[in-house]
């Protein structure tokens, strides 16, 4: 008799609500969302504009307060933390990758990638050594002293991925990471992210409208009108089925 092993949860969201504004101007963005992401998977959140995808991503990442419900990230309860503790948790455990890269144009690539390490208290020498090594891993050897304007879009996104990974976070949050890239470059970026997600003590969550990259997901979470409506086991892997 065969058994399947279900990967442990990285993110556990239950009955989470979030409303913007008050009174007649109140707009409910999350309406009692239930959501799970597992360790070792790349999970995508999809759905129409305004359905709550980015809001859900933001409350999971600890960059936006939520009104009610519970969120646990790798066993730590964000809903029970004081704001300063959420900030500390985020600095150590969360990496961010954005659609427009969000690199600082006046800094070199090494300096950009060093930022999370410096925020976490590393010395500049150690931070820059680790940043250069991470850029090498991302396929950018010798480009550390270039500024972002001297790189292609795909190269800039690789720098952004290096910055997200350099402090070894357990949760990688990606907001439309391929929408500004052509098909081939987007495919290379998704290959990198899929490799990143294979670490058994890590989880990658991607919000996207880009249906070209759906095939890279282990699971697809479909949102509509502030709620999770369906979860698809994209890869046909029973370990990640709901």
Image (tube, rainbow, N blue to C red):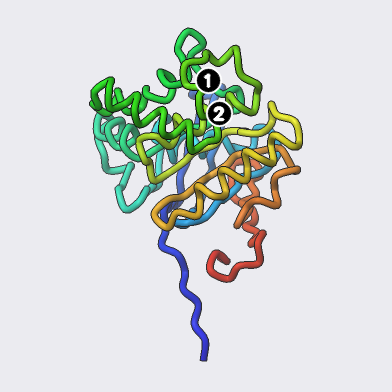
Provide the residue designation for mark 2. Answer: 98
Q: Nearer the viewer, residue 217 or 190?
A: 190
Residue 28 location (% of width, % of height): 55, 34
Q: Residues within 10 Å of mark 2 (few under 14, many from 20)?
A: many
What residue lies at 35% left-to-right and 40% top-to-bottom? 93
User: Residue 224: which numbered mark, if any?
Assistant: none
Q: Can residue 210 be seen in this view?
A: yes
Q: From what the image shows, is residue 75 above or below residue 28? A: below
Residue occupying image coordinates x 41% and y 28% = 132
Placement of the C terminus among the 4 image quadrants: bottom right
Q: Residue 59 location in percent, x, y?
A: 44, 37
Q: x, y percentage for residue 215?
A: 70, 52
Q: Is residue 36 visible?
A: no
Horizontal side of 93 relative to 164 (left or right) equals left
Q: Which residue is drawn at 60% across and 22% down?
A: 100
Residue of label 1: 102
Q: Are marks 2 and 1 in contact (CB under 8 Å)?
A: yes
The correct choice, above or below, for 9 with respect to 90 in the image is below
Alpha carbon distance from label 2 to label 1: 7 Å
Residue drawn 39% across and 34% down?
166
Locate residue 79 relative to residue 102 in the image: left or right.
left
Q: What element carries label 2?
A: strand
- Residue closest to the far top: 106
Q: Is 155 positioned to the left or the right of 3 in the image?
A: right
Please provide percent x and percent y for residue 227.
59, 47
Disc 1: CA contacts within 10 A as few (<14), some (14-19) or many (>=20): some
Q: What element carries label 1?
A: loop
Left or right, residue 60 beside residue 31: left
Q: Which of 39 and 166 is in front in this view?
A: 166
């Amino acid at each position: 008799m065969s058994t399947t092993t279900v990967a442990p949860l990285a993110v556990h969201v239950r009955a989470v609500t979030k409303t913007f504004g008050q009174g007649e101007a109140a707009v409910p963005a999350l309406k009692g969302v239930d959501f799970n992401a597992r360790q070792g998977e790349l999970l995508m959140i999809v759905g129409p504009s305004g359905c709550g995808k980015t809001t859900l991503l933001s409350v999971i990442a600890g960059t936006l307060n939520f009104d009610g419900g519970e969120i646990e990230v790798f066993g730590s309860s964000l809903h029970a933390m004081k704001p300063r503790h959420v900030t500390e948790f985020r600095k150590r455990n969360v990496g961010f990758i954005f659609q427009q890269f969000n690199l600082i144009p006046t800094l070199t690539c090494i300096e950009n990638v060093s930022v999370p390490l410096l925020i976490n208290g590393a010395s500049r020498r150690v931070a820059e050594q680790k940043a250069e090594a991470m850029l090498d891993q991302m396929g950018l050897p010798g480009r550390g002293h270039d500024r972002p304007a001297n790189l292609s879009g795909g190269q800039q996104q690789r720098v952004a991925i290096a910055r997200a990974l350099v402090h070894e976070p357990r949760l990688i949050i990606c907001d439309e990471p391929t929408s500004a890239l052509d098909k081939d470059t987007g495919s290379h970026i998704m290959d990198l992210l899929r490799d990143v997600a294979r670490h058994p003590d890590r989880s990658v969550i991607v919000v996207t409208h880009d249906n070209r990259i759906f095939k890279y997901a282990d699971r697809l979470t479909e949102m509509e009108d502030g709620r999770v409506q369906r979860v698809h086991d994209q890869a046909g892997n029973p370990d990640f089925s709901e």
